[in-house]
Image (spheres, helix red, strand yellow):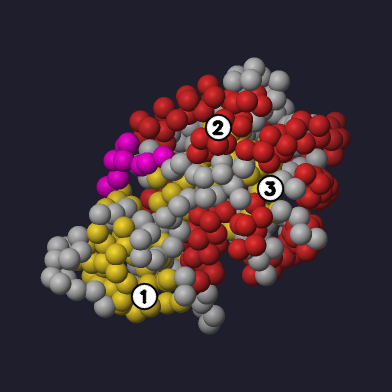
């Protein structure tokens, strides 16, 4: 019937879970109400010949968060979410970081208040556990996990890394509360030894940063956490796998039936460690560091065979100045340079270029890695798919190749680590719950428009059977 839908996207190439449909999308009251041949709507958008995919779901972004070095990262919720939207991402999970001695509930309350003021897209939070000795830790963790937060992140390195006994204790609480434990897995002792040897030898450059975090640090910690998950029967998500051996450890654990998921990131898929040889190499410093071309090939294989479940940005924004990466001076040694690079805006276009172009495009794979799997694993109901009843979070892609410039992202970082990289397309129109938030090269989203998404307790066995 004419006017049945609030909005119709007309004539697109729609990537649905069952395949690509050439046709229309009807949207009403923020949800997808019809797919295929759709009657007139009260408004229409011409999408003829263009790809339409779900809005991206990025489950790993550091926003308005204090680093372990005591630096506040460059992005507020407003600037980070603006950048995400411009890159086709409509849902983000960021980190509520616990300070030393701070009760978990207080950390979450403070972070949620900041998000409520600035959030421009839909969002959820991971809890970062930095101090298990803080007052009421176990009770707070269980309460937060059962009240809609679902996920906790722990580290095995840095000054907030947990020891084995603490990790097992956190896993025990999460198991009872239906939580998913996310892990930055690198062996701290291996890193500390390598770092000390390099600094003693006067090797202090950004290139030496890669050497300071040996691949064995990741391999050992990934294998250990997989065994802990298996022993405790507690689901874990291993963040930012960077090595061939790390992916192989995940593959072996899953073959044993261990409740393990894992992700990687664009900077491991499209960069290798030679980026640190460039002038101002600190811009590309992250942890784990970029690795070798052989590792890149292994990570792509692991994405194709399902060993790695998704691609996140690990957006960690620091300006290349005295407020960020150069806070200890322009010639600071690598151990005093903030780690991380911006990625919220480029994750979707980079993956689109790699998976949706060429002789063997893989639209279902692209959607699975960037939207569908993150939504399923992290319990984001109504997100990540183009299906009736789902939120109308959508991206209409342009068909014009684009080369990134020196500072053309919409975050607050001030440089683009992908300068000179060409992508086949970028988002032309982005919708959040049926409302256009990006069009004509501009972000129309408003601070406070984004909604916090409560998530149900994690059913690890059921979820793992689906993946």
The Cα atoms of the two marked residues, 1 and 3, are separated by: 35 Å
Near mark 1 (Cα within 10 A), the count class, few <14, some 14-19 or many ≥20, is many
Near mark 2 (Cα within 10 A), the count class, few <14, some 14-19 or many ≥20, is many
Q: Nearer the viewer, mark 1 or mark 3?
A: 3
Residue at disc 3, secondary structure: strand
Q: Is residue 219 left or right of residue 122?
A: right
Residue at disc 2, secondary structure: helix
Q: Nearer the viewer, mark 3 or mark 2?
A: 2
Quadrant of the image occupied by residue 36 = bottom left
Residue hosting label 1: 13
Q: Position of residue 411 (x, y in %)?
A: 42, 42
Residue hosting label 3: 236
Residue at disc 1, secondary structure: strand
Quadrant of the image occupied by residue 10 = bottom left
Disc on res. 144:
2
- Residue at image coords 37%, 41%: 451
Q: Position of residue 238 (x, y in %)?
A: 68, 49
Q: Position of residue 5 (x, y in %)?
A: 20, 64
Q: Are marks 2 and 1 in contact (CB under 8 Å)?
A: no
Sequence-wise, the earlier of marks 2 and 1 is 1
Disc on res. 339:
none
Near mark 3 (Cα within 10 A), the count class, few <14, some 14-19 or many ≥20, is many
Q: Is residue 95 above or below residue 70?
A: below
Q: Are marks 3 and 2 in contact (CB under 8 Å)?
A: no
> Start and end of the magenta stretch?
444-452
Quadrant of the image containing the N terminus:
bottom left
Q: Where is residue 308 in the image (x, y as percent from the top left)?
A: 66, 60
The Cα atoms of the two marked residues, 3 and 2, are separated by: 17 Å
């Amino acid at each position: 019937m004419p006017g049945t839908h609030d909005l119709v996207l007309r004539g697109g190439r729609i990537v649905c879970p069952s395949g690509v449909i050439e046709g229309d999308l009807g949207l009403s009251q923020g949800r997808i109400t019809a797919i295929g041949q759709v009657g007139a709507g009260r408004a229409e958008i011409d999408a003829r010949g263009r790809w339409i995919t779900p809005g991206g779901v990025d489950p790993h972004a550091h926003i308005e968060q204090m680093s372990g070095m005591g630096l506040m990262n460059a992005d507020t919720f407003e600037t980070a979410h603006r950048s995400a939207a411009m890159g086709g991402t409509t849902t983000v999970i960021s980190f509520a970081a616990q300070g030393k001695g701070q009760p978990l509930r207080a950390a979450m309350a403070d972070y949620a208040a900041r998000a409520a003021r600035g959030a421009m897209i839909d969002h959820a939070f991971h809890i970062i556990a930095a101090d298990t000795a803080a007052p009421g830790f176990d009770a707070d963790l269980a309460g937060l996990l059962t009240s809609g937060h679902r996920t906790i992140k722990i580290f095995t390195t840095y000054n907030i890394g947990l020891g084995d006994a603490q990790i097992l204790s956190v896993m025990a609480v999460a198991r009872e509360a239906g939580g998913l434990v996310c892990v930055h897995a690198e062996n701290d002792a291996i890193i500390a030894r390598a770092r000390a040897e390099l600094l003693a030898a006067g090797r202090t450059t950004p290139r030496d940063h890669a050497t300071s975090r040996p691949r064995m640090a990741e391999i050992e910690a990934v294998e250990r956490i997989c065994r802990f998950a298996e022993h405790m029967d507690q689901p874990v998500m291993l963040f930012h796998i960077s090595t061939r051996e790390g992916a192989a450890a995940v593959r072996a654990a899953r073959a044993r039936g261990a409740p393990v998921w894992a992700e990687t990131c664009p900077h491991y898929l499209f960069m290798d460690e030679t980026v640190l040889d460039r002038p101002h190499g600190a811009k590309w410093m992250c942890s784990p560091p970029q690795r070798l071309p052989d590792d890149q090939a292994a990570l792509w294989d692991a994405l194709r065979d399902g060993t790695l479940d998704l691609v996140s940005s690990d957006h960690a924004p620091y300006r290349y100045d005295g407020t960020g990466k150069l806070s200890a001076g322009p010639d600071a040694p690598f151990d005093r340079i903030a780690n991380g690079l911006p990625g919220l805006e480029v994750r979707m276009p980079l993956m689109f270029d790699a998976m949706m172009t060429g002789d063997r495009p893989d639209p279902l794979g692209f959607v699975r890695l960037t939207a569908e799997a993150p939504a399923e694993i992290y319990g984001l109901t109504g997100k990540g798919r183009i299906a009736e009843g789902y939120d109308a979070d959508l991206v209409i892609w342009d068909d014009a190749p684009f080369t990134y410039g020196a500072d053309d992202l919409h975050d607050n970082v001030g440089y683009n680590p992908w300068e000179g990289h060409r992508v086949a397309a970028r988002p032309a129109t982005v919708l959040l719950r049926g409302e256009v938030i990006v069009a004509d090269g501009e972000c129309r989203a408003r601070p406070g428009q984004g909604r916090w998404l409560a998530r149900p307790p994690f059913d690890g066995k059921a979820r793992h059977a689906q993946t």
